[in-house]
Amino acid sequence: MTVPAASAPHVVVLVCERATTTAGDRMLLVGVVAEVTGVPRAEVVVSRRCARCGGDHGRPVLVRCGERGVEGIDLSLSRAGRSVAIAVSFAGPVGIDIESVAAASHAGLDDVAFGPPERERLASADGSPALRTAMWTAKEAVLKATGDGLRVDPRELEVSFVGPMRGSPPRPALAGWPGAPVPVGSFHLSALDVAPGLVGTIAVIAPARPDIRQLAPAAHQSAAP
Ligand SMILES: CC(C)(COP(=O)(O)OP(=O)(O)OC[C@H]1O[C@@H](n2cnc3c(N)ncnc32)[C@H](O)[C@@H]1OP(=O)(O)O)[C@@H](O)C(=O)NCCC(=O)NCCS
């Protein structure tokens, strides 16, 4: 399926089986960029460069996208279990994070991750492991969208949820971050539909809430090594 650039949705998300190598995951990312822009894969180049030290790590960056150019396209990537999540944003800087509920259930996360208001919120949902993991992925997604990663203490951010705390995953929201580089209202968070046992959040920095369009994984599973 090819989505012409003119009708490209604001943010495209793919969650599928991860490749066996990080280079393979990067090829999946290249494939999604090619698909949603209509630019041939061979003309799409994704790199990564640490904003802090210039090293070969950090957020993925689109450095070439055929004649379309790279302007206005932001990327993010996350892995958990056997899955990889990829985001290609036409709306603004993006962060995506998926996490295994089991992996995030270790004792000790609460101390390094959540402040008192957040612990109260989780307690009101009977400490739901899925909700707790969702709160954590919301923080990581926001910190990936800014490019800070865990250089920022996640307890500086406060995450809340919009809607009922029980049942289907409520929508996460950034309730506060005193040191935020942009106004807190510019962060638009959405829960992702991921594999069983995983939860995920996408965060986009944009003037208005963007559309999030999730691609069907089937066409991408076997494309990468
Ligand atoms: C980014 C970070 C939150 C990753 O979280 P995680 O849950 O362990 O791993 P995930 O699978 O979800 O994400 C990994 C991906 O995040 C992306 N990423 C890494 N650093 C990032 C950053 N600062 N901002 C946005 N995205 C980043 C990369 O795409 C990475 O994939 P890659 O290893 O194939 O390049 C965490 O590793 C981190 O904060 N790293 C930065 C630490 C740092 O900056 N140290 C100083 C270096 S000089």
Image (cartoon, grey):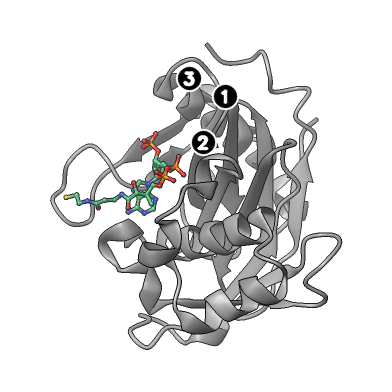
Residue beneath disc 3: 24
Comes first in the chain, label 2 or label 3: 3
Residue matched to label 2: 79
Amino acid type at image mark 2: Arg
Asked if the residues shown at circle 1 and circle 2 are in contact, with their CB atoms under 8 angstroms apart, the answer is yes
Q: Is residue 21 above or below residue 1?
A: above
The outermost residue toward the left is 53
* Position in image of residue 63 (x %, y %): 37, 42
Q: Is residue 120 above or below residue 24?
A: below
Report whether the residue tagged 2 is closer than 8 Å to ligand 1. yes
Give residue 190's quadrant in the image: bottom right
- Look at label 1 and name its amino acid: Arg
Secondary structure of the residue carrying tag 3 is helix
Horizontally, is 116 left or right of 149 in the view? right
Q: Position of residue 39 (x, y in %)?
A: 60, 34
Which mark lies nearer to you, 1 or 3? 1
* Circle 1 residues within 10 Å: few <14, some 14–19, many ≥20: many
User: For the residue with label 1, is its CB less than 8 Å from the closest atom of ligand 1?
Assistant: no
Residues at marks 1 and 3 touching, judged by CB atoms closer than 8 Å: yes
Mark 3 close to ligand 1, CB under 8 Å? no
Asked where in the image residue 159 lies, by quadrant, the reply is bottom right
State whether residue 169 appears in this view. yes
Q: Which of the 4 image quadrants contains residue 166?
A: bottom right
Q: Which residue is mark 1?
A: 18
Could you say where residue 104 lies in the image, as x and y percent from the top left?
Answer: 52, 47
Nearest the eye: 204 or 80 = 80
| Quarter of the image that includes the N terminus | top right
Q: Amino acid at mark 3?
A: Gly
